[in-house]
């Protein structure tokens, strides 16, 4: 029972840490790539992205999903190919949803800025780019960035979470089992 409770704590910590990391960097990259970086816009983007990532993290059993896909490819847990597949699975689940909401938020902010300027009688030549080109280019950038972030930070956060909540010694069979049972994004 204690192992199950520790696994849940590890999973929760993984969801929060990975959600915060992905949200921070994806919202920063998206805001910077817009060409109109503003701290309030970035903070709003980060908050919305973080909330979305937490919802996904609590609803999707990432560990079960990534283990299933990894097994279907016949890969051994902990190997480089398995880590790549696990990172890709997480990236495919999180990044398109976060990117979609970030694009919708950005389009709404552009429309609000144009309306505010027009209300003050300031002529504004602000045009929102077409949705699909904007979404697809942002998605391509976000998928690459998301994959790299997940690949790098998941094992780091896993080790930290196991040290905080697990009872296994680093490198032990128990730790390897705990990492396997509550790995990436804690599911």
Image (cartoon, rainbow, N blue to C red):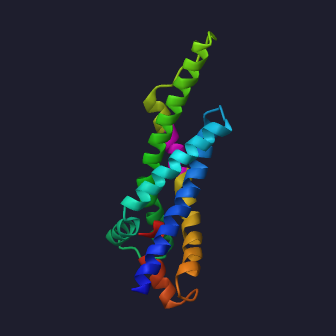
The overriding secondary structure of the stretch rendered in magenta is helix
In the rendering, at what x and y percent does residue 164 appear? 58, 79
| Identity of the residue drawn at 55% across and 51% down | 23
In this rendering, is residue 60 above or below 178? Answer: above
Q: Nearer the viewer, residue 66 or 85?
A: 66
Q: Is residue 125 magenta?
A: no
Residue 82, quarter of picture? bottom left
In the rendering, at what x and y percent does residue 40 appear? 64, 38
* Badge count: 0
Residue 185 seen in the figure:
yes
In this rendering, is residue 32 above or below 71? Answer: above
Q: Nearer the viewer, residue 68 or 105?
A: 105
Q: Nearer the viewer, residue 2 or 64?
A: 2
In this rendering, is residue 75 above or below 108? Answer: below
Farthest front residue in view = 120
In the rendering, at what x and y percent does residue 141 appear? 54, 44
| Identity of the residue drawn at 53% across and 54% down | 146
Q: In what quadrant of the picture does the C terminus appear?
A: bottom left
Q: In what quadrant of the picture does the N terminus appear?
A: bottom left
Residue 183 seen in the figure:
no
| Identity of the residue drawn at 48% across and 62% down | 87
| Identity of the residue drawn at 57% across and 89% down | 169
In the rendering, at what x and y percent does residue 28 appear? 62, 45
Q: Is residue 143 magenta?
A: yes
Q: Which residues are magenta?
A: 137-144
Q: Is 154 left, or right, of 94 in this rendering? A: right
């Amino acid at each position: 029972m204690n192992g199950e409770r520790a696994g849940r704590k590890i999973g929760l910590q993984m969801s929060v840490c990975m959600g915060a990391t992905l949200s921070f960097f994806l919202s920063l990259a998206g805001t910077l790539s817009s060409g109109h970086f503003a701290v309030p816009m970035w903070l709003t983007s980060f908050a919305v992205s973080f909330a979305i990532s937490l919802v996904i993290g609590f609803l999707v059993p990432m560990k079960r999903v990534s283990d299933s896909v990894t097994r279907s490819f016949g890969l051994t847990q902990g190997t480089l190919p398995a880590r790549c597949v696990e990172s890709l699975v997480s990236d495919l689940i999180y990044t398109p949803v976060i990117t979609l909401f970030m694009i919708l938020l950005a389009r709404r902010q552009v429309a609000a800025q144009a309306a505010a300027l027009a209300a003050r009688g300031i002529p504004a030549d602000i045009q929102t780019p077409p949705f699909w080109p904007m979404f697809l280019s942002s998605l391509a950038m976000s998928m690459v960035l998301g994959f790299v972030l997940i690949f790098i930070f998941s094992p780091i956060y896993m080790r930290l979470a196991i040290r905080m909540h697990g009872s296994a010694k680093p490198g032990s069979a128990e730790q390897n089992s705990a990492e396997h049972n509550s790995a990436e994004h804690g599911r």
